[in-house]
Image (cartoon, rainbow, N blue to C red):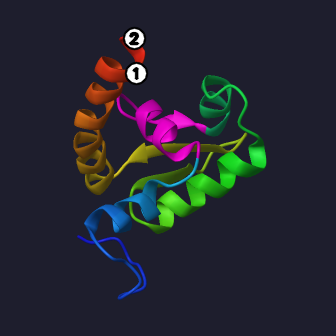
């Protein structure tokens, strides 16, 4: 499965991947969804400083890219959960070496 993007606009694979995860909050959203599905409010509380508008926008973009799955449960009150798709899981796996580099070379100082 590939992420639906405009063909020909990218120079290389890193450029294409950065388009999907670009922005201050997207990688942190992916990290928060690693272990289990989360509701919107849970994500907002765990990502100190993100506005509701930005979080909602990033979740919509990640959903459109096939990275995040949004499941609306037919309950009262309504309940919506966000989780990683298989493509999102593979993206998180690809980001693990980058996280290891940051821990070693930036946080380890």
Left or right for 91, reference 76: left
- Classify the position of the C terminus by image quarter: top left
Residue 67 lies left or right of residue 98; in this view the side is: right
Dividing the picture into quarters, in which one does residue 7 lie?
bottom left
Q: Nearer the viewer, residue 97 or 82?
A: 97
Observer-nearest of 58 and 9:
9
Q: x, y (%) of residue 38?
A: 51, 34
Q: Position of residue 97 (x, y in %)?
A: 22, 35
Give SS at disc 1: helix
Count of labels in the image: 2
Q: Calculate the distance from the C-alpha at mark 2 to the C-alpha at mark 1.
A: 6 Å
**Residue located at (31% from left, 61% from top):** 14
Could you tell me which residue is drawn at 57 percent across and 53 percent down? 59
State the image quarter where residue 18 is shown.
Answer: bottom left
Q: Are marks 2 and 1 in contact (CB under 8 Å)?
A: yes
Q: Is residue 22 above or below residue 1?
A: above
User: On screen, 98 above or below 94?
Assistant: above
x and y percentages locating residue 107 in the rendered image = 41, 16
Task: Kindly identify the residue that appears in the image at 77 percent across and 50 percent down.
Answer: 53
Q: Is residue 52 left or right of residue 65?
A: right
Q: Give residue 106's mark.
A: 1
Q: Residue at x 49, y 68 (%)?
A: 64
Label disc, if present, on residue 109 of the rendered structure: 2
Residue 90 inside the magenta-drawn segment:
no
For the residue labelled by badge 2, is the local secondary structure a helix, a strand or a loop?
Answer: loop
Q: Which residues are magenta?
A: 24-39
């Amino acid at each position: 499965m590939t992420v639906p993007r405009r063909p020909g606009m990218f120079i290389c694979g890193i450029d294409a991947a950065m388009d999907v995860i670009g922005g201050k909050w997207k990688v942190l959203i992916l990290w928060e969804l690693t272990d289990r599905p989360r509701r919107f409010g849970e994500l907002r509380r765990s990502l100190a400083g993100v506005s509701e508008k930005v979080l909602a926008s990033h979740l919509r973009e990640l959903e459109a890219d096939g990275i995040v799955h949004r499941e609306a449960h037919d309950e009262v009150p309504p309940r919506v959960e966000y989780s990683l798709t298989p493509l999102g899981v593979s993206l998180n796996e690809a980001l693990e070496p980058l996280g290891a580099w940051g821990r070693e070379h930036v946080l380890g100082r």
